[in-house]
Amino acid sequence: MPAVSETIDAVASVTQGTYKYGFETEIDMEFAPKGLNEDIVRFISAKKNEPAWLLEWRLKAFALWKTMEEPRWPAVSYPPIDYQDAYYYAAPKKKVGPKSLDEVDPELLRTYEKLGIPLKEQAILAGVEGAGEVPAEGGEARMPVAVDAVFDSVSVATSYKERLAKEGIIFCSISEAVQEHPELVRQYLGSVVPQGDNFFAALNSAVFTDGSFVYIPKGVRCPMELSTYFRINAKSTGQFERTLIIAEAGSHVSYLEGCTAPMRDENQLHAAVVELVAMDDATIKYSTVQNWYPGDAEGRGGIYNFVTKRGACRGARSKISWTQVETGSSITWKYPSCILQGDDSVGEFYSVAITNNRQQADTGTKMFHIGRNTRSTIISKGISAGHGQNTYRGLVKISPKASGARNFTQCDSLLIGDQCGAHTVPYIENRCMTAKVEHEATTSRIAEDQLFYCRQRGLSEEDAVGLIVNGFCREVLKELPMEFAVEAQKLLQISLEGSVG
Amino acid sequence: MLKIEGLTAEIDGKEILKGIDLEVPQGEVHAIMGPNGSGKSTLSYVLAGREGYEITGGTASFNGHDLLAMEPEERAATGLFLAFQYPVELPGVGNANFLRTALNAQRRSKGEPELDAMQFLKTARARMKELSMPEDMLKRGVNVGFSGGEKKRNEVLQMALLQPRVAILDETDSGLDIDALKIVADGVNAMRGPDFSAVVITHYQRLLDYIVPDRVHVLMGGRIVQTGGPELAKQLEASGYGSVQAA
Ligand SMILES: Nc1ncnc2c1ncn2[C@@H]1O[C@H](COP(=O)(O)OP(=O)(O)O)[C@@H](O)[C@H]1O
Ligand SMILES: [Mg+2]
């Protein structure tokens, strides 16, 4: 049962204009000099002790990036970004193998605490020796969550590794994967999102600092949800995460990505790339709760989130499912996509995007139907409040060979107040006679009678809005793993603070 | 005691309530009857605090609390409940979730401990059984896809769970067959007691065979034009509102 009472508590603890996760950790950084040029790319690669092929790969990306222009087609506006006025590398000072939590930087622990990470997991995250071992008698009732924390640019620790290793699963930072499994990284890196795919992907390819790597061997069902907490933590440090997930034939994995960020004055650029590869009969479920600092009520200081996420259903009957709850960032530019190559493969996109105050979101998905009988489902729920601008932009492309392909798209927009905007831009390119494409779209407002009905039953106006919005998003929220569903509901309500009354 | 004196209200500049005087002492059930458009629902909305009405004069209080000065949720917290003539649909909001959220919001405001999911389900299931409601109505969206009768029973279920001290039932009997009518009446009668009062708005005297009111008022043209005992309802049924002279 959804924990709405928790939602109410969460809201009570947040006052308007303050961002719950707005804090900044003081940890010594090793900065690369400001700016972006070939030397910086070389510096990053050298810092990470990378093989020559990867440096070449980065340099090629950088060369491509220099020839490209920032996309102007999204329905978002922001002042020009000075790419030379940012740091491209920052890492917490190295401290190898603390023996206990007492030896861990207290600032780091405080950060975890504020994030609500349980003590046991804090130890694992901080890399305390022996903390990651799971008791032999699996006494846990719930499915455990393995966490790979990206604390600034370097993965601070990876947990549950041993248990996963038993199944042959690799779950580590991408830097570690480059060292330990170079052949896998080399084979798949850039195979779904090539270096020159788009401006931000090229930038990421040149300077990515860290991210997660997941490999699920043939026939293995990952015994736990894999999770990453992303945090942006150094002033003016762009974040360029790179995530690569490979699911071999018949395997199954559910991956959770969640983020909160400290409050700050300057806009922060974030340009991540996520690549997924699913072979025959494999399933990848990728869930995101994105809660980066959205800026203040005037839109100052929020995160720019320009992400490229794409999954390739290479195998027959493979399935890739994206679920996202986007409540944060001042600007979101993001289109998790599926390339449905394998016959009978399935792509899904479930999205909730909230824009409040001055937030802008241009988000949606692309479904490329290439194989026969490929199916895709798109459910998008956009909520606009304040002066928020929310655009759904989606492409369903069906190639002549994709006989029997099916797409169902549903885009619902909910408006709160009369200063906000919702826009739906669905592109359909169907070049196959036997394919079927369905599109439904609605725009509604929270009705006065719905609010009154709730308030007559004793709910405050904000709780009523939270309840109605959560109801509006139900089809998407039910796709989230339990661990995320509760947090997502809180976020929806927190994000709409002050939007009514 | 619910006490209304000289209450006048308008909507979009049009005067609907033209001076309502009404007293419902604790422990009593009063019926309000009247033709369509006479202002019955308007009165119930004004008492519950719906936006869009301008109160131009008069007072309304419950047990000494000035209702008109409070937000709708504060009125609910003092024990005022409105069973809507047209219950509102909340798509995607599970009925159980909604009921528990409402119940806990009210318990919090009274300083009582909140019910967890299990405690709530136990209570809710017991009440539903009394109202012959199938259990799957807890899982469905609030009033979404409910038949007219199911919606009305859902209102009575909410009343039974929230245990208000004064309930206004706005045509809760409309559209019910005789069996459903009896169930709804049982629900109301079960609440009767020294600390519960109710205002039952209805068109038809047949509901009043099952919920026997202490007093019957006739509302016409925004005023209470006649007041009597249960026999007044029977009289109206026989001769119609035409026999009542607008004051
Ligand atoms: N939103 C509104 N705007 C204008 N007039 C309204 C509105 N709602 C109700 N009315 C008018 O107020 C009068 C009383 O309506 P109502 O209280 O619903 O009557 P009843 O419940 O007795 O049938 C009617 O004449 C109706 O047309
Ligand atoms: Mg009415």
Image (spheres, rainbow, N blue to C red):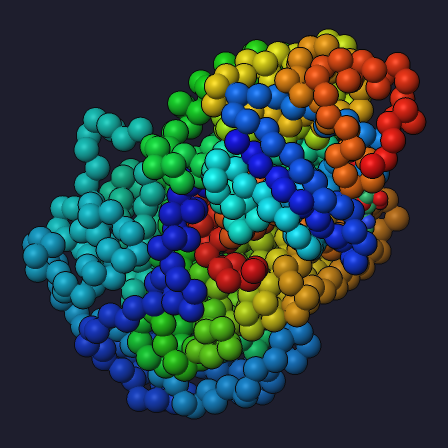
Q: Is residue A109 left or right of residue A147?
A: left
Q: In the figure, B198 relative to A217: above or below? A: above
Q: Residue at x 41, y 53 (%)?
A: A11
Residue A422: x percent and y percent?
A: 69, 64
Front residue of this view, candidates A93 and A385: A385
Count of numbered circles in the view = 0
Residue A243, quarter of the rendered image: bottom left
Residue A264: x percent and y percent?
A: 36, 76
Q: Residue at x 62, y 12 (%)?
A: B186
Front residue of this view, candidates B82 and A483: B82
Q: Is residue A467 left or right of residue A401?
A: left
Q: In the figure, B139 relative to B41: above or below? A: above
Q: Residue at x 84, y 51 (%)?
A: A432
Residue B201: x percent and y percent?
A: 72, 27
Q: Is residue A353 left or right of residue B44?
A: left
Front residue of this view, candidates B96 and A140: B96
Q: Is residue B161 visible?
A: no
Q: Is residue A42 left or right of residue A157?
A: right
Q: Residue at x 63, y 42 (%)?
A: B5
Q: In the figure, B201 relative to A11: above or below? A: above
Front residue of this view, candidates A327 and B204: B204
Residue A238: x percent and y percent?
A: 40, 77
Q: Is residue A352 visible?
A: yes
Quadrant of the image containing the C terminus of chain B: top right
For this orientation, the residue located farthest to the front is B247
